[in-house]
Amino acid sequence: MGNKTSAYIGLALVLGYWAYAIISISTGAVAGKESQWDFKTYYYAAKVDAMGGDPYSVDALNSVAPEQIALPYVYPPLTIYFFRVFALFDWSTAFQLWLWLKVILAALLVILWRASFYNGGSSALFLLFALLAFTSAIYWDLLTGNVSLVEQILLWLGFLFFIKRRSIPFVILILLASFFKFTYLAFLILLLMLPKRQRVVAGGLGLIGAGGYAAASYLVDPERFASFLTLVRLIKEGGAEYNHSMLAFLTDTSNLIAASTGTTPLPQGVVVALYLLLVVAVVLATTRFWRRYGATGETRDSSSVLIVFMVCIVYAVIAPRMKSYSYILLILPAFYFVREYAKSYALLFAFMLLSLGKWTPLPTVDAVRLLWWHYPWLLALLLWILMLKELKRRRVPAEVSP
C-alpha cells in the first residue's frame, strides 16, 4: 500500500470520526444526554425578548420553555437580536440550523487555518488533532451549542488581515468577535506590531467601536445592561464547571489547600491580587519575544503568524475565564508548536499526557482532580514556557508556511 493510499485511508477514517461526532449530536444520541444546552438558553432568551419579557431572568425563560433551563443568558443586551433570527423557528428546526451552521463554520475555520496560517503535517493528523485537542474543544462547542465557533471564525479572519497588514478590516473583525465577549478586545494589542500610522488610525477606530458598542448596549436599555453586569459579576466558575483559567486555578488551589488543612481559603481579593501579579509577570516575560519579532512593524508574514500564535497562547494563559470550548483558539498554535519545536520536549509532553489521569488510587486524589480540571490551562502554560524558551534559543524565528 502506497503512502498516498494510506494517507487517503487515514483521512477517510478521521472524517468518518468527525461525521460520527456531529451526527451523534444532531440525533441526540450522545450517551443519552441532551445537547446544545447553551443554545437552548439563547433560543428561549430570544423568545422571551420577542414577547417583551426579561431575557436575563431564568424564571422568564422557564415560563416559555417546555423543559427546565438552568443557565442564564449572560451576553450584552444587543446580542439578543442575533438569536431573534433563530427564535422565528420552532425549537427542533432552530436546533438543527444552529448546529449545522456551526459545523460549516468549523469546516471553514479548519480550511482557513491550513490555507493561510500553517499547513505542516498531514491533513488527517491535523483533523484528528483538531477534533481531540484540549479535551475536544471543538466538539465541546458543538455539543454545548455555545457561540464560540462564531467568535473564532471572526477572530481568525481578523488575524488573517493582520498578517496581510490590513489594519482596518482587522480591527472591524476583532470588534465583531467581541460582540459577545468583551475580553477579545485584548487582541487589538496586535496593532502595536504595525507601522505607526496604521496603529493610530486603526487604534482610533477600535476605541470608537468598542466605546460605541458599550454605550449603545447601555442606552438601548439601561435596566437590561445593569442586569447583564450583575449576572457577569455573579459568575463564580471553577475547574469543576469547565472554567480552565489562571484565576480559576488559583481559586481552586486556595480552596483545596484550605479543605486539606482545615483552614479558611484566601479572601477572593487576595486571590485576585495574586492573579493580577502573575498576569503582569507573564506579560513582562513575553515582551522579550515581542521586541525581538514585532517591534519594528516590518516583520515578515511568517513572523506575523508566529506573533499571532504567541498572543493567542498568552491570552489563554492570563484570561480570567476560559471555558473548554474557548481553547479552540489554541488548536492551531499548539499543533504548530508540537510539530515544529516539541522534539526537544517530548518527555515533558509525554509526562503531561500520561500523568494527569482522571482516576487514581493514590491518596492525593483531590490534587490530581485539580490538575485534571485545569488540564487545558496547564497545557497552555506549558506551551507558553516552552515556546519562549525555544524562541530565545533561536536567533531567527522558524518559518510558518501557509
Image: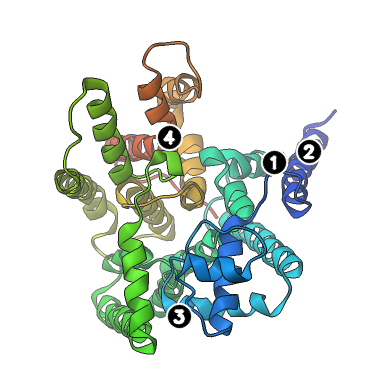
Give the secondary structure at mark 2: helix
Q: Amino acid at mark 3?
A: Leu
Q: Amino acid at mark 2?
A: Leu
- C-alpha distance separating marks 1 and 4: 29 Å
Marking on residue 13: 2
Residue underneath mark 4 = 373
- C-alpha distance separating marks 3 and 1: 40 Å
If you read the primary sequence from the N terminus, does the residue marked by circle 4 or circle 2 appear first?
A: 2
Contact, CB < 8 Å: mark 1 with mark 2?
yes
Q: Amino acid at mark 1?
A: Ala
If you read the primary sequence from the N terminus, does the residue marked by circle 1 or circle 4 appear first?
A: 1
If you read the primary sequence from the N terminus, does the residue marked by circle 3 or circle 1 appear first?
A: 3
Mark whose residue sits in front, 3 or 1: 3
- C-alpha distance separating marks 2 and 3: 42 Å
Contact, CB < 8 Å: mark 1 with mark 4?
no
If you read the primary sequence from the N terminus, does the residue marked by circle 2 or circle 3 appear first?
A: 2
Residue underneath mark 3 = 78
Give the secondary structure at mark 1: helix
**Residue neighbourhood size for the residue with mark 3, other residues' Cα within 10 Å, grouped as few (<14), some (14–19), many (≥20):** some
The quarter of the displayed image where residue 4 is located: top right
Residue underneath mark 1 = 124
The quarter of the displayed image where residue 297 is located: bottom left
Residue at (65%, 44%) from the top-left corner? 127
**Residue neighbourhood size for the residue with mark 1, other residues' Cα within 10 Å, grouped as few (<14), some (14–19), many (≥20):** some
Give the secondary structure at mark 3: helix
Residue at (52%, 56%) from the top-left corner? 70
Q: Amino acid at mark 4?
A: Trp
Mark whose residue sits in front, 1 or 4: 4
Residue at (49%, 65%) from the top-left corner? 58
